[in-house]
Image (tube, rainbow, N blue to C red):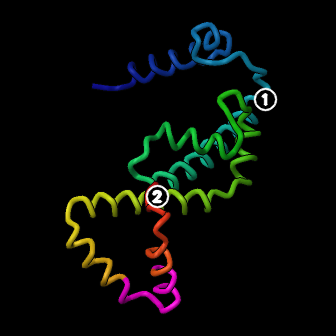
Amino acid sequence: MSDLPFLHFTALTCKISSRTGRMEAKGCAKPAVWKDARRHFYWAVRARVAKSAFLGALAEASPESTHEYRLSLLNNLAYIDSTSEPREVAEKLEKLDVSATVMQLRADNLIRRLIDLTNEDRKATLSGLERLADNLSLEDRTALIGVLQNAGRSPGM
C-alpha cells in the first residue's frame, strides 16, 4: 500500500494551515510582520540555544533544583523576562558570565550533600574528612583549620 495519498493530504493540510492569516486566526502564530519572520526566527533560535546552554550548566551545578528555579535564576541574572524580544535575550545571554553563579551552586549542592551524609553516618563522614585533610596542601589545611576554629560560623546556614 502506498503512502502517497496520506503524504499528499498532509502536504495539502500543511499548505493550507501555513498561511499567515489562517495561523493567526487559529492562535498558533502571533500577528507579526512576516517579512521579518526569518530574522525573528534566527534570533529566537540563538536565544533558545544560549538559554539551553546556560540552563544545562545550572542543572549540572545544582541537579536537585527545579527547571523553573533555574529559569528564574537565569532570567534574573540576565535581566530578561517573557516580554523581552528574542534578539535582546540572545545578546544579553551571549554576554552573560555565569561562572560565579555556577561555582556557588556547586558549593551549595556539595554542602547540602555533605550535611545529608553527616546526618546519615557521622563516623564515615569524619573518616572521609580525615582522609581529605591528608590530601590537602599545607596552606589549604591551615585554611581549613581556621574555618573549623571559627565558632561563629555554621556551614550551610
What crowding class fits label 1: few (fewer than 14 Cα within 10 Å), some (14-19), or many (20 or more)? few
**Left or right for 121, reference 84:** left
Q: CA distance from mark 2 to mark 1?
A: 44 Å
- Labels in figure, total: 2
Query: Which residue extends farthest top?
Result: 25
Give, as a single range, the part of the protein colored magenta: 133-144
Which of the two residues, 140 or 85, is positioned nearer the viewer here? 140
Amino acid type indicated by mark 1: Asp
Amino acid type indicated by mark 2: Asp
Identify the residue at image location x=46%, y=86%: 141
Identify the residue at image location x=51%, y=81%: 143
Which label belongs to residue 116? none
**Left or right for 112, reference 137:** left
Which label belongs to residue 36? 1
Camera-near label (2 vs 1) is: 2
**Left or right for 135, reference 51:** left
What crowding class fits label 2: few (fewer than 14 Cα within 10 Å), some (14-19), or many (20 or more)? some
Q: Is residue 134 magenta?
A: yes
Identify the residue at image location x=21%, y=60%: 120
Disc nearer the start of the sequence (2/1): 1
The residue that disc 2 covers is 108
